[in-house]
Every structure is written in C-alpha cells, then in structure tokens.
C-alpha cells in the first residue's frame, strides 16, 4: 500500500507538541511499515534525510492555506491513504485517496482564546473547516476518549467513524541529562508552553499557598516558552511579587533536551494540572523517568495517568497545593507513585501507535 502523510508542522528544533508528534509519526511509520508499504511525505519545506531517515518520497506543497487548497484540489495524489493532522488540512482531495485526519485536540469553548487572529482562526477552523473535513474522511483518529467525545458532541458524528490510538511520548532514557544548578533544588517542576490553558496561574497560586502554609525551602521551576506576547507571563510575575516569592520561582524559557532530562530527574514532582489537553504527553514523559506526577482529575489527563498519578481539581489551587505538600512530605507516597508511573509508561510508545495507524490504513 502507498501511504501519504502531510508532515505539518515540520519542525526540526524546538518542536511544539504537534510538531514533535509529526516527527515521531514519520519515523515510526517508516520503521513499522518497512517492506510492506511505501510512503510519501508532503511538506512545505524539504524534510532533512539526516533528520528523518528511511525510504520515502518527499513532495513539496505550497505555503499558505489558499495555495494549499488549490494545490490539493488540482492534483490526484498517488497514494491510497492520506494521514494528516487537523486543523492543518486539505479540504478536498481528488481521486480515490482515502483521508484519515488525526485530531490531536479540540479547543474547549470555556478556555478563553486570546487575540483577534487566534479567534478568527478558531472560528474558521473549528466552525467551518473541520466539520467538512470530518464528514469527508474515511475515518478519524483521536488520541483519547475525551477527544473522541468532544468531536462527536461538536459535530454529531457516528461513533464507528473513530478509532482511539494513544500517542507515544518523548523517550529521554538514552539522553545524558544535565543536572540543574544546585541553587534551584529542591523544586516542583513544569515543562511546556507558558499559556492559560496549561494552568500556569493555577500552579503559581498553588505554589504560593504551599509556601505560605509550610515555609518549606522549595522552589518552582518552569521550563517553556512564554506564550502570548508576555502578557500572561507578566500576570504570573505579579502574582509572585505580591506574595514576595519572585526569587523562589524560576522561568527558564526554552531548555535543551539534555537540560530537560536533568530537570525531570531531579524534580520533587512534575506538576501538570492542565485545563485542557488532547492527550497529555508530558504525563507519560515524566513517569518514564521516575518522576511522581500531579495532574488534573479531568479528561483526558485522568485517562492518560490512570492510577499512577495524584489527581487534582485543576481549577482549585488548594487541591493542587495539598498534592504538592503530600509529595514533599510523604516519601512512601513518592516511592509508590514512581513505581506505578514507571510501569504505566510502558503501555505507551510511538511504535505501538504507528502499528495501529498502519492497521487502520489497510482496513478502511
């Protein structure tokens, strides 16, 4: 079978969550499908053969939505099945090619969208384009029961049009970690983009409550880009300044893979009380490295974490703060979470996901 995949967003360095997923899907489709299938990867910029190794054809597509729409509309693709991430999508594909969109996430309506451009993109993408794409698709892949339920509720689609395929995660086990500066330890840790839906304000509020209640010599370390033009970051800094804890919270910005592993390995716990995710890869990433995890009791975080994490109400800073204190003071609890997390992480991999992608491709 000839299988196509639209490799967008294609990012080699500092990849976003979706960009990282695109990398891993390509790599593992090639590995798991070697000898049985041929592959065509479509991208706006050439894919580096040293970065994505294997046998595949790389077809360049134009930049910009209108140009891409015309490009796909005027060509017959020489593939039997086409996978692509939404909302980065071709509206129409000519010929007999079957399309399988991969919907990693669907924005929640109760999470504010900041910025006029983001609001317009959300309106056009989720209000107009996604329903059209889903209706025309041969099948739809989602990474969790929560995402499946959200898409079905939003677009009234039949249950048999979906397959849940859990994502893998960034496997850092073979990376040589760089330990953080001793001045940062001990610390609670978060890694990811600093933006509202990640609930950094909830983490900061919980940390402030923890410090005011315990006076423990614990820091808060956040690794990730600052997000929406700095406004949200400034709000967080103001929170910390009012509590007199500016010196105890460290926003590191982008960190290398080696630094990231070192930060994970030396953390008291990984704190991930996100307000909304399509899956939540960092939960499994942290567990795979033997780090206790605090995450949201809402879907899909509870689905992904299972019984291997402390679950909290993400909108209740007191709940998050109490979980922080439990992990800090209860060594037996930390040990139990580490043991459960290491076992739980083994249930997820990009190799497994790719095998399920290929099995679906041959069955639609």
Image (tube, rainbow, N blue to C red):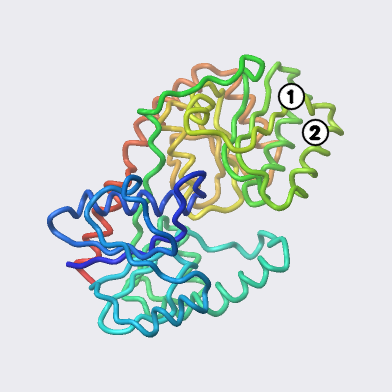
Which class describes the residues within 10 Å of circle 2: few (<14), some (14-19), or many (20+)? some
Q: Are marks 1 and 2 in contact (CB under 8 Å)?
A: yes
| 324 sits left or right of 175 in the view | right
Which class describes the residues within 10 Å of circle 1: few (<14), some (14-19), or many (20+)? some
Q: Give the residue displayed 72% in from the left and 29% down from the top.
A: 249
| 249 sits left or right of 313 in the view | right
| 177 sits left or right of 56 in the view | right
Question: Helix or strand or loop: what does disc 1 sit on?
Answer: helix
Q: Which residue is mark 2?
A: 240
Q: Position of residue 200 (x, y in %)?
A: 67, 42
Q: Position of residue 272 (x, y in %)?
A: 57, 40
Q: Position of residue 179 (x, y in %)?
A: 53, 19
Q: Give the residue displayed 57% in from the left and 77% down from the top.
A: 127
Answer above or below: position of 23 versus 341. Answer: below
Question: Helix or strand or loop: what does disc 2 sit on?
Answer: helix
Answer above or below: position of 231 versus 160. Answer: above
Q: Give the residue displayed 63% in from the left and 65% down from the top.
A: 109
Residue nearest the viewer, comparing 341 with 254: 254
Q: Which residue is mark 1?
A: 248
Q: Give the residue displayed 50% in from the left and 22% down from the top.
A: 178
| 178 sits left or right of 119 in the view | left
């Amino acid at each position: 079978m000839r299988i196509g995949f639209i490799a967008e967003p294609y990012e080699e360095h500092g990849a976003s969550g979706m960009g990282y997923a695109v990398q891993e899907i390509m790599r593992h489709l090639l590995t798991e499908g070697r000898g049985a299938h041929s592959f065509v990867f479509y991208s706006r910029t050439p894919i580096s053969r040293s970065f994505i190794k294997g046998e595949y054809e790389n077809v360049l597509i134009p930049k910009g939505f209108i140009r891409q729409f015309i490009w796909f509309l005027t060509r017959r693709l020489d593939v039997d099945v086409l996978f692509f991430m939404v909302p980065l999508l071709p509206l129409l594909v000519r010929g007999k090619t079957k399309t399988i969109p991969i919907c990693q996430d669907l924005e929640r309506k109760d999470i504010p969208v900041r910025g006029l451009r983001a609001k317009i993109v959300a309106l056009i993408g989720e209000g107009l384009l996604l329903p059209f794409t889903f209706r025309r698709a041969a099948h739809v892949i989602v990474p969790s029961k929560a995402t499946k339920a959200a898409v079905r509720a939003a677009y009234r689609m039949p249950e048999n049009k979906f397959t849940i395929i859990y994502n893998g995660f960034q496997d850092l086990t073979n990376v040589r970690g760089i330990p953080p500066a001793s001045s940062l330890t001990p610390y609670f840790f978060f890694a990811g983009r600093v933006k509202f839906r990640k609930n950094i304000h909830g983490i900061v509020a919980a940390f402030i409550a923890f410090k005011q209640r315990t006076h423990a010599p614990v820091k808060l370390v956040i690794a990730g880009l600052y997000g929406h033009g700095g406004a949200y970051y400034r709000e967080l800094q103001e929170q910390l300044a009012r509590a007199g804890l500016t010196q105890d919270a460290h926003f590191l910005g982008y960190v290398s893979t080696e630094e990231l592993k070192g930060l994970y390995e030396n953390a008291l716990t990984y704190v991930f009380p996100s307000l909304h995710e399509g899956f939540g890869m960092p939960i499994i990433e942290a567990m795979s490295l033997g780090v206790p995890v605090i995450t949201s009791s809402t879907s899909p975080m509870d689905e992904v974490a299972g019984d291997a994490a402390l679950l909290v109400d993400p909108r209740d800073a007191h709940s998050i703060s109490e979980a922080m204190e439990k992990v800090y003071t209860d060594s037996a609890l930390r040990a139990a979470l580490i043991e459960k997390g290491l076992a739980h992480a083994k249930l997820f991999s990009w190799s497994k996901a790719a095998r399920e992608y290929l099995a679906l491709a041959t069955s639609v």
